[in-house]
């Protein structure tokens, strides 16, 4: 079908709008502004392309249909709620289910053959009747449909929860829109691309938009980017003017410091008012694409792909098997004319035993694939069938439950994962360097500062130059609070004296690079005025505004180039040690300086007038970021397990001191070889990039999009990647793209925790190696469990097939005068698999949520729980024996000595196998070489065959000798 031609009336290609928004989401240094300018030319050109204007809005009411046809409606059309019947049909559309239905029907057909053959006058065994086979097949199908209905209901609940979470009504339901030169209220679902919408503080942006008029508009974009700081929005022309007037400042600013004309859907206006042009609505806006990614993006896991491949081959094999079997049946019927009832009956019994075995495998596959523990059990079957399919599959790299166990590379952020998320004051430089670390004795203030006046200014800045109450502010001011508490400084007294009602604070921004506060009730202002401004920020930014400094005597001196170089030299020493450097400066204000309230600045000026120049440099404060305890040991444990740890850092300049002493992953002199800039490596060829990714320990200058690029490249080079996030909303895409997403749950956002596979409830990165070891132990336990179960079932079925072939009426497992049909054994074992799967699921959940959190459960708890599961399993087996004994009397058997010997042998073998499984599981930690060989999970299918052959030989010896 050919695509619909785009109407010629709109000159705005939708692909360019999508690219513009994507440029903003991926921007590093205002690339979207220049892209906007180069593609569209100006805001007016974009308005003309949308057939609208800022004054009149959309005027062609009759053209709404064409506008909707081209740009779409402002509704989410990609998501439709599934009904129960549809969901059930989708779940039933599975190759495993088709095979089970097929063989169940074939089992009934085989029983009909036997019934027809018995009409020659031979007596028909009651337990071999058509009714019993029909009952067997019916119970299989009931079990099949019951499980399907259960998981269909579960899927529907999950689907509804996702839709309810993603699309709860948010913000206003009506917006003020300019249409036909008039302002009107329009419902959010009736908004069109090209509408001119009025925004103000508190408004939620309904669709992706461009600012066309605005007054001090600021938008909080944490729902999309994870940045809690409001971003300044200006028109395209104002943004270009700002960038041209502040080229040097803009070049060193982060991506969200410079203003932008782009507004993203579902973000909130915090300040200002203006007019916006809607450029993308409905499914085309950024928020809808993110929701679609979260709810619908479910790429098949490696084990799911392997399951589909194996089942396809098994389906082909079964079709060929049935075809050949039909030919053999016809040949036997033609040769014997169905006159030999014994031959025909034994042949049909063998065929029914094979069908029961096949249905057992299919039931097991189905319960494993769709059950709670699913992929763990199924990986054992995948490994067992792998040699037969000429494909050597590594179990450790296939299972879904142990996604963390398959990884080769761990990509982790520093912020919120490796560090404690707080600073502490390390050094103070006021003409001299003073150590302030907690491990050093407290340096008296009179040694740090030359006189009481300088000390008083220092305390005024630390206690009052904040956003308000110090405990509600940033990590930096929290560090100051902790520092002052060590000296018993009462911050409340300073704040009560110098911060009155409505005190003025100029908060930190990426463009200004500082926070400034005006203090009142200043007694020693040199101009006799009672106000003083303090500024604190990066040393380079503060020095630009200083023209004097405090000397060793406490006097103000002119700041010369030599003084600047000396201060810069000291700050470089601190930064080389991985410390964060802040400069502190002040200025005594004059009355009406910078306006009546001291808050004047030019329209395109970055700094307020009172902080732009004339400051006096006071001191340097150096702070260190605390690394969590045991991080270096954790990284070493990963390396010992052949798992590489790569660190993602947002800083352009990497401190070797932080990574050498704090994390212990760099050695002196290895910085150039083991640290690479994300932007630089993206230009490398694949061969060069492969070597860089292999040996690099730290990636610097990581921005949104860089982490996703690294994950994709590692995956292209055949590596399994785990991504560890501190919990930011902007980590949703890398968490989803990685093979195993891990999120810190205590500090993480809701969206990041919902996206991740494993949640660290206590934000403890050092618990991951413990989870890795528990996973290895868990796999071994499950493998042994499965091996014992297969041995028991397979041996009993093998004996039953042999007895059927020898014309001994043993269509079930005999116990005295009572019989167990193969179907009953298979169903009971299927239920046991399912229930034990639930128990294993609880263990795995414990390891993911608690073992990776507070480490409530460890290796011994896993072994204890495993033993409990086996006890429950054997209790159920005994209950099954008692149930059959009380419900199915079998008095008509020929109780000859041979029959009793056979019955006793079968029961003894079954009992010994059960006891053997207990012994094997109890000795699973044995170090004996022979036991390790026997317990090895590889090739357990071959070992099962060997045991079955041994049992068959024993039965032959018992029968004929």
Image (cartoon, grey):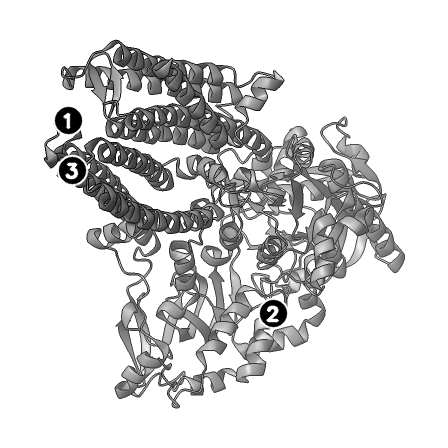
Report the disc number at residue 117: 3
Report the disc number at residue 125: 1
Q: Residue furthest bottom?
A: 8
Q: Residues within 10 Å of mark 2 (few under 14, many from 20)?
A: many
Q: Residue at x 72, y 52 (%)?
A: 585
Q: Which of the image's four quarters has the C terminus?
A: top left
Q: First in sequence: mark 2 or mark 1?
A: 2
Residue 207 screen position, x and y as percent: 39, 68
Q: Nearer the viewer, mark 1 or mark 3?
A: 3
Q: Residues within 10 Å of mark 3 (few under 14, many from 20)?
A: many
The quarter of the displayed image where residue 506 is located = bottom right
Helix, strand or loop for disc 1: loop
Residue 216 screen position, x and y as percent: 50, 68
How many tags in the picture?
Answer: 3
User: Would residue 840 be found to the left or right of residue 472 on screen?
Assistant: left
Q: First in sequence: mark 3 or mark 2?
A: 2
Marks 1 and 3 in Cβ contact (< 8 Å)? no
Report the disc number at residue 30: 2
Helix, strand or loop for disc 2: loop
Marks 3 and 2 in Cβ contact (< 8 Å)? no
Query: Alpha-carbon distance for marks 2 and 1?
Result: 85 Å
Would residue 129 be seen by someone viewing this image from the given angle?
Answer: yes
Q: First in sequence: mark 1 or mark 3?
A: 3
Q: Residues within 10 Å of mark 1 (few under 14, many from 20)?
A: few
Residue 534 screen position, x and y as percent: 66, 51
User: Would residue 142 be found to the left or right of residue 16 on screen?
Assistant: left
Front one among 476 and 495: 476
* Position of 201 relative to 842 (above/below): below
């Amino acid at each position: 079908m050919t695509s619909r031609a785009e109407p010629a009336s709109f000159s705005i290609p939708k692909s360019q709008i999508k690219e513009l928004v994507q440029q903003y989401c991926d921007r590093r240094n205002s690339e979207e502004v220049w892209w906007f300018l180069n593609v569209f030319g100006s805001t007016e050109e974009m308005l003309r392309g949308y057939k609208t204007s800022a004054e009149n809005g959309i005027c062609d009411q009759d053209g709404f249909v064409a506008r909707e046809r081209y740009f779409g409606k402002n509704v989410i059309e990609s998501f439709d709620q599934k009904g129960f019947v549809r969901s059930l049909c989708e779940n039933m559309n599975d190759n495993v289910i088709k095979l089970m239905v097929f063989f169940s029907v074939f089992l009934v057909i085989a029983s009909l053959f036997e019934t027809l053959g018995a009409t020659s006058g031979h007596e028909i065994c009651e337990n071999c009747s058509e009714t019993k086979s029909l009952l067997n097949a019916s119970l299989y199908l009931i079990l099949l449909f019951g499980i399907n209905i259960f998981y269909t209901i579960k899927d529907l609940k999950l689907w509804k929860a996702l839709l309810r979470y993603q699309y709860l009504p948010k913000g206003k339901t009506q917006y003020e829109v300019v249409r036909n030169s008039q302002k009107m209220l329009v419902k959010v679902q009736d908004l069109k691309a090209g509408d001119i919408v009025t925004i103000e503080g508190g408004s939620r942006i309904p669709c992706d938009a461009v600012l066309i008029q605005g007054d001090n508009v600021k938008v909080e974009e944490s729902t999309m980017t994870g940045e809690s700081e409001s971003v300044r929005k200006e028109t395209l022309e104002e943004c270009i003017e700002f960038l041209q007037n502040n080229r040097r400042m803009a070049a060193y600013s982060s991506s969200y410091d410079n203003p932008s004309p782009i507004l993203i859907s579902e973000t909130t206006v915090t300040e200002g008012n203006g007019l916006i042009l809607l450029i993308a609505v409905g499914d085309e806006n950024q928020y809808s694409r993110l929701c679609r990614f979260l709810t619908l993006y479910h790429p098949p896991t490696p084990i799911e792909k392997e399951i589909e491949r194996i089942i396809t081959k098994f389906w082909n094999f079964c079709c060929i098997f049935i075809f050949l079997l039909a030919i053999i049946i016809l040949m036997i019927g033609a040769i014997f004319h169905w006159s030999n009832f014994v031959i025909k009956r034994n042949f049909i019994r063998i065929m029914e035993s094979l069908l029961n075995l096949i249905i057992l495998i299919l039931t097991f596959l189905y319960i494993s694939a769709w059950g709670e523990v699913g992929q763990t059990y199924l990986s054992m079957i995948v490994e067992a069938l792998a040699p037969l399919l000429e494909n050597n599959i590594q179990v450790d790299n296939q299972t879904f439950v142990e996604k963390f166990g398959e990884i080769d590379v761990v990509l982790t952020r520093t912020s919120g994962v490796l560090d404690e998320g707080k600073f502490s004051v390390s050094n103070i430089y006021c003409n001299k360097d003073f150590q302030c670390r907690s491990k050093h004795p407290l340096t008296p203030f009179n040694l740090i500062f030359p006189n009481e006046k300088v000390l008083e200014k220092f305390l005024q800045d630390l206690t009052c130059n904040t956003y308000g109450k110090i405990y509600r502010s940033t990590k930096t001011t929290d560090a100051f609070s902790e520092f002052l508490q060590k000296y018993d400084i009462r911050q409340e007294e300073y704040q009560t004296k110098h911060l009155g009602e409505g005190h003025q604070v100029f908060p930190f921004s990426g463009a200004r690079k500082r926070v400034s506060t005006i203090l009142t009730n200043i007694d020693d202002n040199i101009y006799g005025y009672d106000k003083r401004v303090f500024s604190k920020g990066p040393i380079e930014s503060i020095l630009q505004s200083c023209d004097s400094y405090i000397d060793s005597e406490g006097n103000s001196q002119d700041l010369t180039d030599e003084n600047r170089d000396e201060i810069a030299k000291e700050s470089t020493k601190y930064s080389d040690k991985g410390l964060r450097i802040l400069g502190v400066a002040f200025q005594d204000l004059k009355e009406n300086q910078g306006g009546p309230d001291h808050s004047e600045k030019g329209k395109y000026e970055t700094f307020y007038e009172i902080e732009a120049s004339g400051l006096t440099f006071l001191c340097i404060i150096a702070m260190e970021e605390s690394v969590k305890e045991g991080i270096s040991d954790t990284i070493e444990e990963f390396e010992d397990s052949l798992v590489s740890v790569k660190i993602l850092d947002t800083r352009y300049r990497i401190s070797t001191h932080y990574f050498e002493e704090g994390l212990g992953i760099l050695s002196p002199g290895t910085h150039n070889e083991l640290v690479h800039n994300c932007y630089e490596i993206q230009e490398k060829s694949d061969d060069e990039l492969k070597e860089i990714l292999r040996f690099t320990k730290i990636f610097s200058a990581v921005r949104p999009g860089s982490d996703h690029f690294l994950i994709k490249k590692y995956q292209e080079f055949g590596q399994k990647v785990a991504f560890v996030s501190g919990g930011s909303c902007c980590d949703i895409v890398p968490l989803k793209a990685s093979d195993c997403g891990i999120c810190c749950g205590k500090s993480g956002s809701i969206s990041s925790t919902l996206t991740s596979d494993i949640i660290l409830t206590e934000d403890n990165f050092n618990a991951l190696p413990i989870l890795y070891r528990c996973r290895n132990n868990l796999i071994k336990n499950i493998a042994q469990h499965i091996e014992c179960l297969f041995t028991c079932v397979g041996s009993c079925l093998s004996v039953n097939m042999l007895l059927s072939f020898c014309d001994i009426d043993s269509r079930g497992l005999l116990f005295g005068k009572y019989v167990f049909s193969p179907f009953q054994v298979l169903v009971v074992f299927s239920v046991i698999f399912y229930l034990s799967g639930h128990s294993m699921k609880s263990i795995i959940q414990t390891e993911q949520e608690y073992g990776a959190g507070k480490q409530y459960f460890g290796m011994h708890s896993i072994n204890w729980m495993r033993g409990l599961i086996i006890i429950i399993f054997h209790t159920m087996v005994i209950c099954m024996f008692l149930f059959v004994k009380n419900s199915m009397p079998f008095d008509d058997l020929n109780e000859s000595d041979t029959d009793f010997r056979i019955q006793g042998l079968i029961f003894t073998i079954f009992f010994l196998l059960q006891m053997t499984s207990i012994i094997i599981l109890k000795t699973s930690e044995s170090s004996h070489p022979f036991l390790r060989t026997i317990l090895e999970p590889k090739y357990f299918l071959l070992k099962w065959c060997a045991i079955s052959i041994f049992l068959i030989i024993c039965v032959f010896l018992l029968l004929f000798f």
